Amino acid sequence: MKLIGLVGTNSAKSTNRQLLQYMQKHFADKAEIELIEIKDIPVFNKPADKKVPELVLEIADKIDAADGVIIGTPEYDHSIPAVLMNALAWLSYGIFPLLNKPVMITGASFGTLGSSRAQLQLRQILNAPEIKANVLPDEFLLSHSLQAFDKEGNLIDLDTCNKLDAIFDDFRIFVKMTEKLQSAQELLRKEAENFDWESL
Ligand SMILES: Cc1cc2nc3c(=O)[nH]c(=O)nc-3n(C[C@H](O)[C@H](O)[C@H](O)COP(=O)(O)O)c2cc1C
């Protein structure tokens, strides 16, 4: 199984990136996870010619080719980071790499709530007409993320490890299940392609 881990931050030091790196290593025998950075994507400016930056097209191709995507999001002011919103705006601007794509959301935050509000918001965004991803219902929240890893980058708390293992196993089943949801796929793609916010 080939998965993309989308690092939802442009911060050089990030516990969300650390979590995705841990998953990449820890689940190496279950899936190949390629981490993708979004920090160099230009700010979305709705270009009239609808030209999507080369970097975004490269990311979209990788998502297209993958069986699923894991999105790791921090929480800033109860929201997903602007840089992640920016990436998702480009990734739904005349291109549809996330359409019907199985997505697992992870989030880490320094406080107790572990990015729960950002994760809810991300679910809503991923349901937009030009994104329409298939999002795994389970949530993985990593609270107190600054204290969560040891020096080797492994998660310290056993219950947290077990929960992540269980949710990831569910995600792998979810990826296989969603492959079977073919009936409406073509119709949904046509709907997304024909959808235009500006000629409503
Ligand atoms: C401007 C700002 C706003 C923040 N807002 C929230 C918030 O609403 N909820 C929360 O749990 N943490 C909040 N935090 C703390 C972040 O969870 C933490 O700084 C960090 O970004 C966690 O992710 P990271 O390690 O991947 O950077 C905020 C931090 C900053 C700098």
Image: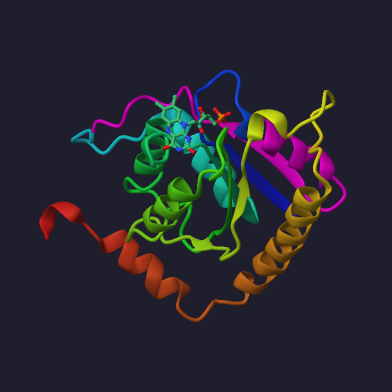
Q: Residue at x 50, y 43 (%)?
A: 60
41, 52: nearer the viewer:
41
Query: On the rendered structure, is 97 left or right of 28?
Result: left
Work out which residue is located at the far top of the displayed protein and give it: 12
Where is residue 92 drawn, in percent x and y?
A: 36, 48
Q: Residue at x 69, y 31 (%)?
A: 18
Q: Residue at x 21, y 56 (%)?
A: 196
> Which span of residues is magenta-colored?
18-45
The quadrant in which the N terminus is found is bottom right
Q: Is residue 35 magenta?
A: yes
Location of residue 47 with respect to 5 vertically, above or below: above
Where is residue 132 drawn, in percent x and y?
A: 41, 61
Location of residue 112 with respect to 133 vertically, above or below: above
163, 83: nearer the viewer:
163
Query: On the rendered structure, is 86 left or right of 57?
Result: left
Location of residue 200 with respect to 185 vertically, above or below: above
Give the image's coloring scheme: rainbow
Q: Residue at x 68, y 38 (%)?
A: 20
Query: On the rendered structure, is 179 left or right of 76?
Result: right
Location of residue 196 with respect to 111 vertically, above or below: below
Residue 149 lies in quadrant: top right
Where is residue 58 drawn, in percent x and y?
A: 52, 35
Where is residue 88 drawn, in percent x and y?
A: 40, 43
Work out which residue is located at the far front of the displayed protein and give it: 112
The quadrant in which the C terminus is found is bottom left
Residue 43 lies in quadrant: top left
194, 4: nearer the viewer:
4
Q: Is residue 196 magenta?
A: no
Work out which residue is located at the far left of the displayed protein and give it: 199
